[in-house]
Amino acid sequence: MRIPEKHFNLCACLISVAMLTSSLHAMPKKHSEPVAVPFEAELSPLILIPVRINNTAPLWFIFDTGAGTSVIDSDTAGKLGLKIENPQQTPEPGGAITEGTVSSVTVQIGSALPEHCSIQAAPIGQLGRYIGHDFAGIIGTDLIQRYTIKIDYAAHELLLLSPEDFKPAADATEIPIDIVDGQVFIPIQIKNENHAPITGKFEVDTGSFDLLGLNNNFVVDNHLLDEKQSKIPAPGVAAGGATTGYLFLLEWAKVGPVTFDRPLVGYTTNSKGFENRPNAGGMGSALLSRFTVVLDYSRKRILLTPRDGAREHVPYYDMSGVLLNAEGPDWKRITIASVIPGSPAAEAGIQVGDQIVTIDSIVPSSLAQVSMKFRQQGSWRLKVESKGNNREVTLHTRPLL
């Protein structure tokens, strides 16, 4: 079992969470009544939902269409007394990790009927510091495909429906999907300046912060980047450790009925052998959230209804040049994990390891609050602390491209 990489670019506060492949042999179960599951969305429309494992108190899980099978954090599994079978070292983006299987558990999403299944175990909980929120695992395609699911990003709600009873909205656009080893793909057309449009197969990935994340070989093989085109480094982090990549602007990307002008996209150049894939890349939550989305895997389709203002530019990327890190039991200690050379943060003298004490004399309450500020163009007076010494800097945020 292997956890292929997903990209969370620095300008969206990068993380990468696990994705394990599995076959979709389980048949959908009948759920006669719709089940509404409220979700939290930190930083971007990353979906965090309440899940019970063996009737525990609710734990926060990421709802992740990019994960072939569901995963529980290894430490959380230990605390719940779950036995991890067949633990083994496996190569992952950024380095090797130890992962295994937890057999015969019940998984309950919100108030839905408990599902009996086996799930994977991997050390993913520590990645919560990059979203500033506890999370104990991932709900993947093995469970998602048992329902038809409506994702209402505006209402912060999942609606779990019986596939047999579902009827699509009249204004929804149907897009056929391919399901390969638990990964769900749709066609997306993209164009860069001085190039003809290209249609690629992109993974539908609610667990990614990206608009679009491209695989390195897709960028190289299609000559998407001219030598003169601007790009910026995008260091990242994956389940196994650090990755490196770049961000650049496309001319446009067309998803279903909507064309997005000048989307910021990323691609990974080095993730310990995982940067090249047979598909084009992934469509993340920053793009999916422009729609009301219905996942109808039993009919091999998704349905997209553009939300009001879907085509408007929304800065789901950073304008400071830092990767933020949340620490402490309440995730309120905000520190700097990396700084892009030549970025506004580097020009202000912000350094790796600095803690942000105040922004304009206000103590930050969460990583999400700081991240949203740094996605706006402006000037911010920061008090930062490093090794017991405080200093004040002025950060002038601006588009990095």
Image (cartoon, rainbow, N blue to C red):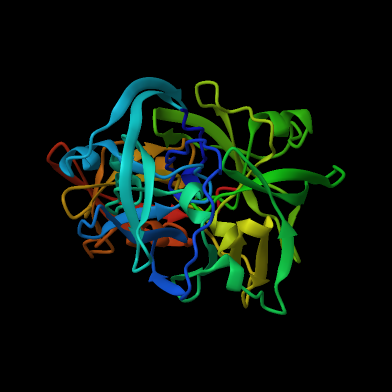
Task: State the residue in front, 81 or 90.
Answer: 81
x then y, percent, for residue 254? 75, 57
Left or right relative to 315: residue 119: left
- How many marks the image carries: the answer is 0
Left or right relative to 30: residue 103: left
x then y, percent, for residue 385? 19, 45
Task: Looking at this view, name the residue that lies furthest to the left.
Answer: 388
x then y, percent, for residue 185? 66, 47
Q: Quadrant of residue 167?
A: bottom right
Task: State the residue in front, 190 or 323.
Answer: 190
Task: State the residue in front, 194 or 341.
Answer: 194
Does residue 337 show up?
yes
x then y, percent, for residue 386? 19, 39
Q: Height in image: 103 above or below 314?
A: above
Residue found at x 68% / y 55%? 300
Residue found at x 72% / y 43%? 201
Does residue 291 show up?
no
Task: State the residue in front, 250 or 356.
Answer: 250
Q: Quadrant of residue 311?
A: bottom right
